Structures are given as structure tokens and as C-alpha cells.
Amino acid sequence: MRTALSLFVALCLPVGALAAAVVAVRATEEWKLAKPALRPDGRVAKLDQLEDFGCAKCHADVVLEWSTTAHALAWVDELYQAELKERKKVESCWSCHVPQPLHVKGLGARPEARAADRHFGIACEACHLGADGAMLGPRGAPTDAHKSTRSDTMIGAGSNALCSACHRTSVGPVIGIAKDLELPELASKGLSCVGCHMGPTRTVEVGGEQRIVRTHELQSPRDPAFLALAFGLSARRDGKNTLIDVANHAGHRVPGLIGREIEFRATLLDAAGKELAEAKLLLDTSSYLPAGEALSIELAGQGVKVHVVGLHHDPRLAEPVRFLDVDLTP
């Protein structure tokens, strides 16, 4: 439960029409995402030994994109390896950090860890190898290298089941936030993990149709610009006070990692720039912002604008990362 602070009140509100408008945009437009600008957080910058990775022989550009992600680094991450030493049942972590091909056993089953090539973390086969040995993709484009099959688990909301195989599981510090996308009110909107975390890079023509090609540089809170997209902020007057509404624009609760905190600091200013009041909102896994809802920061008094700063407290970093810095007019 949140405790009352001076100049701060947090109210859990349905975002109503605002949320509906956001969902409509998500359904009809692509994210305009820049190349991820990842802040160092204790991980190595890029997976090595790519010359030994079979898929790189034909898909070097895709493998290079993947090599910088938390998926590629899922096993070699030094902080992950350090945490394993503190756990009694390390196998519960292995299954999602080095999973066997998820389609082979079935997406409804708990992933199992592979014994070989663990260095490559969540490798291509984990998502793309089908039960019949074919490589699954959004188009099933023919190739002489291997059998290729189009799969709905690679497209839009159908891909949620693939991501949920691991991301619906709560283990260690990780919260199973993918379960939020299984809620009827969210699933019916067509929101997808891929739609937000794998930005479009180009289009190709397949059978006379233009198809989107998405990057394998998975967007994550490690990128401050991407984290900012998870929230919608607006200011309004309420009697003698000023409220800042912080709406969750992600398809799941925020944050989803124990130890991660999202902080909003709001400062009410008059026409001369004098500070009239201050307040803050702190989100963590015990006091999180649910999917499709909003929380309000209450500032005593009224002014001409509110300056809001967003800070990401990453448990890997000594100092918070600023991901948002805006002025709002009530």
C-alpha cells in the first residue's frame, strides 16, 4: 500500500477514452522507433563467438541485431551468472535463459533448458524452429538452405503465445507481465509484444503485397526513449490543486522486474518560473501501474505549467537514468 506523502496523492483511475484512443493508434500505425540507444547496465555490449553461430552464415545482419539484446546475452550476463550462485534451484532459471525450441514441445508447455551451446542464450531456434524441423517465419519465404513455413506465432497478436512461453513466468526477480496480454480486454485490442518491442525497419513485396520486416534489436527499458513511450502524461486542474495523470500505454503492468523503479518528479511553476509545489510518483513491483490504468500526482496550488522528469532506477546501475523531461500546461 502507498503511504501518504506531503503534496502527493496517487489515485488508480481507468484511462477510458484516452486508453481507447491509444489502442486505436497502436492498431493502425507502426511505432516510429529509432535504433535502440542502450545505456550500459552491467551487461557485455555484444555477444561474441558469432563466427561459430550457424544462422549467421546466411542471416548475418539479423544475427548482428540480435547479438546486442538481452536475449542473446541471457546466459553470459555476468549479473545473471552471479545470481545463479545464490539460488538453490538454478534449473528454474535455465529453462528460459537457454530454452530448447519452444514450438517443438508446444507453446503451452513449460520451456526446457538445452544442454549444448548455452553461450548463445535465447538463440534463433528457440523461436523459429518448428516441430517438423521447418524454420518458422511471418512469410515462409522459400530457400534452399532449409524448409520454411509461415506461422501465425510470428505475426501480430499471434506472437504473444510465443513470447509468453517465458515472459508469463514469475521466477526470481522477474514478474510474468506477459499474462496481462492474455486478459480479454487487452487481447481483444490486438496488442502484441512484437508490435511494441520489434520496430519495423523496411518493407518487402511478397506475392504482390507489401510486408513489414521487423528488427531483431529488441527494444527494452534499457533504451530511455523507448521507456518514455510506455507512458502518457497530461496535466489538469482540480479545484485548488493541479493533477498530473500518468497513463500506462504499455500492454502490461509497469515495471516488471523486482528492484526496478520508475520515478516521476513533478514541479509546479508560476509565470515567472518560481517553484510553487513539488510531488513525486514512484512505481515498483509492489506499487505498480496496471495495464490500461493511470495514476495521478497531486500538486497543491495552481500554476502556469508543470515540469515533469522521469527517472529509471535500474538495479544494475548506481545512478538513475533520465528518460523523460517535459513541461505540461494544465
Image (spheres, helix red, strand yellow):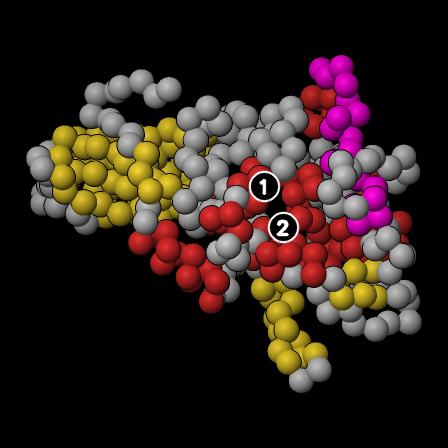
- Residue 314 seen: no
| Horizontal relation, residue 259 to residue 5: left or right | right
Q: Which residue is mark 2?
A: 160
Q: Which residue is mark 1?
A: 178
Instruction: Name the disc covering residue 92, or none.
Output: none
Establish if 213 lies above or below 259. below
Q: Is residue 16 magenta?
A: no
Helix, strand, or loop for circle 2? helix
**In what quadrant of the picture does the N terminus appear?**
top left
Residue most toward the front?
Answer: 184
- Find out whether the residues at labels 2 and 1 contact each other: C-beta distance under 8 Å: yes
Circle 1: is it few (<14), some (14-19), or many (20+) Cα within 10 Å? many
Number of marks present in the image shown: 2
Q: Amino acid at mark 1?
A: Ala
Residue 299 or 134: which is nearer the viewer? 134
Helix, strand, or loop for circle 1? helix
Q: Estimate the x, y position of residue 297 in percent, counting from the top left.
A: 26, 34
Q: Is residue 104 magenta?
A: yes
- Residue 272 seen: yes
Residue 178 or 269: which is nearer the viewer? 178
Q: Residue at x 69, y 39 (%)?
A: 166
Circle 2: is it few (<14), some (14-19), or many (20+) Cα within 10 Å? many
Q: Estimate the x, y position of residue 60 in percent, counting from the top left.
A: 79, 60
The magenta stretch is 85-105
Real-space Cα separation, disc 2 to disc 1, in angstroms: 8 Å
Residue 17 or 59: which is nearer the viewer? 17
Within the image, what quadrant is residue 8 found in? top left
| Horizontal relation, residue 216 to residue 284: left or right | right
Q: Residue at x 37, y 55 (%)?
A: 20
Q: Residue at x 51, y 47 (%)?
A: 184
Q: Amino acid at mark 2?
A: Asn
Q: Estimate the x, y position of residue 182 in percent, counting from the top left.
A: 57, 45
